[in-house]
Image: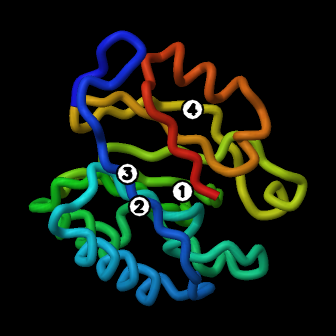
Amino acid sequence: KEARGNSMAEKIRIGSYQGPIAENDFNCNLQKVRTVIDQIKPPGVDFLCFPETYLTGYSHRAVNESALALDDPRLVEFIRETADIDTVILAGLAERDRGKTYNTQIVIYRGSLLGKYRKTILTEDDRKVFATDLDLPVFEAKGIKFGVVICHDTSFVEPALYLRWQGARLLFTPH
């Protein structure tokens, strides 16, 4: 899947899951992610994107209770389980890190955490529970450079332009 000029040399298959979230129930949501992954094989997809905070829920009342660190054993085990899956998985969660909570999208591929993107531009309601991060990483998997911006970030052109200037050819926008 190599980018040439302004077009992709090969077609890629992208899947997006939009379904109910069990608020404040990481285990239930993680099981749904596993079920969806099982349903896409074969023929599979190259990228599979889940909504923002899908794993932990988005209820502002429960975010601090449901937030978890990226080294949470359940999350680490799930990442390991993906080692034989040739699909890049993007999944959202409320991430707890050093006393702050972030609206984070993790990027997983073949048993590894490629990295994370934290929502950059927060709404007034988001600021009540989430911290912001100005890091705009570009990821690479399957020969494609890509970025992520979450929900309200897409109301502004600057995050997407920055990612494009950094070489991203594909942009995921989980809402």
**Which residue in the structure is indicated by mark 1?**
97
Q: Residue furthest right?
A: 124
Q: Quadrant of the N terminus?
A: top left
Q: Are marks 1 and 2 in contact (CB under 8 Å)?
A: yes
Relative to 162, is 79 on the left or the right? Answer: left
Mark 3 residue crowding within 10 angstroms, few (<14) / some (14–19) / many (20+):
few
As measured in the structure, the alpha-carbon distance from the residue carrying label 2 to the one carrying label 3 is 25 Å
Q: Quadrant of the C terminus?
A: bottom right
**Which residue in the structure is indicated by mark 4?**
135
The mark nearer the N terminus, 3 or 4, is: 3
**Which residue in the structure is indicated by mark 2?**
70
State which mark lies toward you, 3 or 4.
Answer: 3
Mark 2 residue crowding within 10 angstroms, few (<14) / some (14–19) / many (20+):
some
State which mark lies toward you, 3 or 1.
Answer: 3
Q: Please state which amino acid type lies under the numbered disc 1.
A: Asp
Q: Residue at x 41, y 87 (%)?
A: 27
Across and down, in percent, residue 70 comes to 41, 61
Across and down, in percent, residue 76 comes to 28, 67
The mark nearer the N terminus, 3 or 1, is: 3
